[in-house]
Image: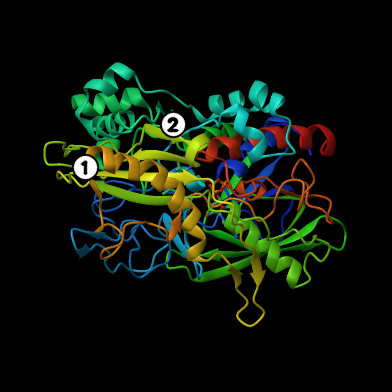
Amino acid sequence: MGGTARAVAGPIGDGARVPVLIIGTGYGGSVAALRLAQAGVHVHMIEMGQAWETPGSDGKIFANTRSPDVRSYWLRTRTKQPLSNFLGFPLDKNVPRYTGILDAEDFSGITVYQGRGVGGGSLVNGGMAVTPLRERFSAILPTVDANEMYSTYYPRANAGLGVNHIDPAWFDSTDCYQYARVGRKHAQRSGFPFVFVPNVYDFDYMKQEAAGTVPKSALNAEVLYGNNAGKKSLQKTYLAQAKATGRVTISPQHRVTSVAPAAGGGYTVAIEVIDTSGNVTSTKSVIADRVFFAAGSVGTSKLLVRLKATGALPNLNAEVGKGWGDNGNVMCGRANHMWDPTGTLQSSMPTGGIDNWDAGGAFAEVAPLPTGIETYASFYLSITKNPNRAQFTYNSGTGAVDLNWQTAWKQPSINAAKTIFDKINSKEGTIYRTDLFGVYKIWGDHLTYHPLGGAVLGKATDNHGRLHGHPGLYVIDGALIPGNTSVNPFVTITALAERNIERIIATDLR
Ligand SMILES: Cc1cc2nc3c(=O)[nH]c(=O)nc-3n(C[C@H](O)[C@H](O)[C@H](O)COP(=O)(O)OP(=O)(O)OC[C@H]3O[C@@H](n4cnc5c(N)ncnc54)[C@H](O)[C@@H]3O)c2cc1C
């Protein structure tokens, strides 16, 4: 450990011995890398997705949501768009198998959407950067001191992520948020509070997009498959700072397959190098003194459950794989009257929500439908108080890790969302859209954007993310959070990682 800063060159070498290896480059991994590097530690980050630094044949790195292409999906031969249908037509199409940016990972009862690449979920998400209300925090992370989170770690996370707020006067006048103003009007007419939601998309840049002075990104339907400008993804914030220390190496298209105690101390980490078709081109074995699991709730849980079951990490406890939730995600659309259009130009970055958490258990983000045509639809992603929790288990027959979530477990989420939208529909004289998720299907209850849990803080780990049973192994991502954050999760994941890494550096690495 320690030593002066030096530029550490490209991918990790086979046979290397390193002080710290981090699996994954999303929020948890990026926070850990930056703070460890600032403390003088050399860090190697392993990322199975691409670096996303090279433009495609259209001159752009990322595709937009109107024309998904080979870059858009992780190793699928057919797209799996969250909104599968529109006006009776299925939207999905065949694409070549490629290590694209958005993974629609299918389990038997749910499809879990996740970002793939350097920056993890920050590459594909809506940028909504929400700090939960303090009075709701004890239900989110019951073992964590709220005082220090709200005085130190949430502010630190907001600063590190570059969170900014929309100018309310501009919101009231710009064409690109007409859909959100319609959402606000309908919410308020039914007596629901509408709240502005901060974002990591640079709203000054968006204003310039609207003025036509810079290339369009949020105003060109870019979000799910990456943003070419405007969004402060982790590559521009935590990871840029981490790389600038000269102590952080990132190895893209490298997938960790095993972690096991090494004979002379530390852990042997097995890695597959993959090409853009997903084929394994070589394997590497390295030894790390400490390993941080930051592969996301699903990635970390799958690794830990398999490593425990196969005997690679036999001392992990029985909590590993448990406590997984979907943050209560459920989607729906409403059909507006012809005199209430939502606009042909819609910013892909949501900036407002309807807060009915205390009364009905739902916080609904007013989401865009940036199709480029007038849809007369209002579209919502609700985060709800869903008590169901699922478990990951190893299937020795297939070698896969399964998740026992059932589609019927979304019913509490639907009920919670209905506390808002049944009332709005009755007040406005409108109905639910039935054409967005299939044929005559109202609820998008087959998916989540917000996987959380599987290695819960204070259960599978101690109260700072140290895995029980194997000293030197840590979890530092969304797997720590027990299933729900009452709002969009990445600010909480970042703040918790800031809290935990500070303690780990102070006590384990000195
Ligand atoms: C479409 C979409 C929209 C969203 N919108 C919002 C929003 O507006 N606001 C919000 O707060 N949240 C949003 N989210 C959720 C948010 O992005 C996630 O909660 C967050 O990214 C999770 O952070 P993490 O650090 O746990 O892991 P991730 O960000 O998922 O990072 C994990 C990384 O590990 C890599 N990895 C996995 N397994 C391995 C392995 N074996 N070897 C090497 N690398 C591996 C993955 O490729 C990934 O890059 C959205 C998510 C999606 C998919």
Q: Residue at x 25, y 21 (%)?
A: 172
| Residue at the far bottom in the pictured view | 397
Q: Residues within 10 Å of mark 2 (few under 14, many from 20)?
A: many
Colouring style: rainbow
- Number of the label disc, if any, that sits on residue 143: none
Q: Residue at x 14, y 45 (%)?
A: 373
| Residue at the far left in the pictured view | 339
- Number of the label disc, if any, that sits on residue 200: 2
Task: Evaluate whether residue 32 shows in this view.
Answer: no
Q: Residues within 10 Å of mark 1 (few under 14, many from 20)?
A: few
Q: CA distance from mark 1 to mark 2?
A: 35 Å
Q: Is residue 486 left or right of residue 431?
A: right
Q: Amino acid at mark 2?
A: Val
Q: Position of residue 501 (x, y in %)?
A: 72, 36
Determine which quarter of the picture holds residue 132.
Answer: top right
97 vs 428, nearest the viewer = 428
Quadrant containing the C terminus in the rendered view = top right
Q: Secondary structure at mark 1?
A: loop
Q: Amino acid at mark 1?
A: Gly
Name the mark nearer the viewer: 1 or 2: 1
Q: Position of residue 54 (x, y in %)?
A: 37, 48
Residue designated by label 1: 429
Quadrant containing the N terminus in the rendered view = top right
Q: Is residue 378 left or right of residue 128?
A: left
Task: Evaluate whether residue 176 shows in this view.
Answer: yes
Who comes first in sequence, dot 1 or dot 2?
A: 2
Q: Position of residue 130 (x, y in %)?
A: 50, 32
Q: Position of residue 53 (x, y in %)?
A: 41, 46
Label 1 within 8 A of ligand 1 by Cβ? no
Q: Residue at x 24, y 40 (%)?
A: 220
